[in-house]
Amino acid sequence: MKSSVLLIYTGGTIGMHTDPESGALVPFDFNHIYEEFPSLRRLEVDIEVLPFEPIDSSNASPELWVRLAENIRDNYERFDGFVVLHGTDTMSYSASALSFMLHNLAKPVVFTGSQIPIGVLRTDGRENLITAIEIAAAKDSKGRAEVPGVSLYFQNRLFRGNRTTKQSAEELSAFASNNYPPLAEVGVSIQYNHTYIARPKAGAQFSIDTRLERDVAIVKIFPGLTESIFRAMLSSGIKGVVLETYGAGNAPTKEWFIGALKEAIAKGISVVNVTQCSNGEVNMDIYETGVALQKIGVISGRDMTTEAAVTKMMYVLAHEHTPARRAKMLKKSICGEFGK
Ligand code: ASP
């Protein structure tokens, strides 16, 4: 029997073509995807399209994530897999958020997009779209989805969604997963790396949980950061901070810096430490500059991306209401967002 895939179109470069009248790039109507892209009919997959009002993903928000989660839930039984077409700019944030919001996902939710519009001859969108659909439809010998969970497919590689980051505004290989190996590599055939693909517990019921706390911030430290600016960043009703530090999780040991963080933590603000480096992980045991953070209750984000850390913060703060319980949940891997 043919597999079925729901293609949810949210916008971004992939859905653009040249307007015959103005010559400008405009979003095309995804209901006409087969006219734009007739070779899709040749796939041995039943595809249904669910177009949202297209947005540039710079305008993505938790409302979009909730809408995606609800549409996946409402269509969960009808389809074998889901492909989400999304602008590349914030795709890693959306894939990370969805990984926390969709529980016991036994089916694939594959995010993809493109650097060049699908209506342009040299587009990378055609291959990304076709292979994402193939992966979303793929079953193993036991009839289970090859790659359950939220993933991101781009330029011949499939990654765990919450381990990705957009690494290039120019290269067609726009995404990287620096701390976790690809789930699949695509050449003449699709090679699945089964060791790295996580599966939900057998029989666990799929559900969604869309509660997210919005009062969070990402604070990137830099040499020259002043006390007044830092204190301003930690004020105004903030409940959680993702602190982007140097190297293996190091930050200044200046009294005012540690003092400001200590006061924030004493007020109940959760602080998670991630590194500004594109690979490697936070280890607050190595240098004095990291030990000082650990002592005052800063939580290690280990090898998490900033995208995963901030969406996890939104999720955790909406679910746990005491600093101790929040810290406990932030230290755990919820859906493979850190660790090996
Ligand atoms: N600005 C676009 C977006 O993220 C870029 C893209 O789709 O590649 O929606």
Image (tube, helix red, strand yellow):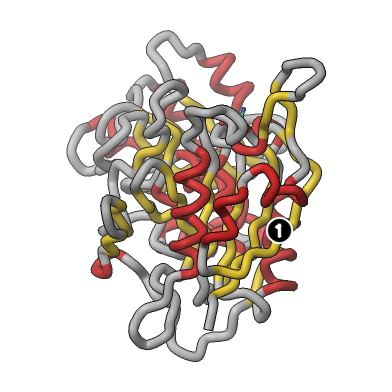
Judge from the rendering whether residue 199 lies leftward or rightward of residue 311; answer left or right: left
- Residue depicted at x 61% and y 50%: 38
- Residue depicted at x 50% and y 41%: 307
View quadrant of ligand 1: top right
Vertical order, 133 against 252 (above or below): below
Task: Tell me if I can see residue 23 in this picture.
Answer: yes
Mark 1 neighbour density, 10 Å: few (under 14) some (14–19) many (20 or more): some
Residue 104, given in percent of the width and then of the height, sits at 52, 76
Residue projecting furthest to the bottom? 203
Residue 248, given in percent of the width and then of the height, sits at 25, 35
Quarter in which the C terminus is drawn = bottom left
Residue projecting furthest to the top? 224
Vertical order, 248 against 23 (above or below): below
Residue 13, given in percent of the width and then of the height, sits at 61, 32
Closer to the camera in the image, 336 or 20: 20
Judge from the rendering whether residue 338 lies leftward or rightward of residue 235; answer left or right: left
Judge from the rendering whether residue 176 lies leftward or rightward of residue 11; answer left or right: left
Task: Name which residue type carries label 1.
Answer: Val
Task: Tell me if I can see residue 266 in this picture.
Answer: no
Closer to the camera in the image, 104 or 71: 71
- Residue depicted at x 34% and y 48%: 157
Does the numbered disc 1 mark a residue whose Cβ is under 8 Å from ligand 1? no
Q: Secondary structure at mark 1?
A: strand
Judge from the rendering whether residue 254 lies leftward or rightward of residue 311; answer left or right: left
**Dot 1 corresponds to which residue?**
49
Vertical order, 12 against 111 (above or below): above
- Residue depicted at x 34% and y 46%: 156
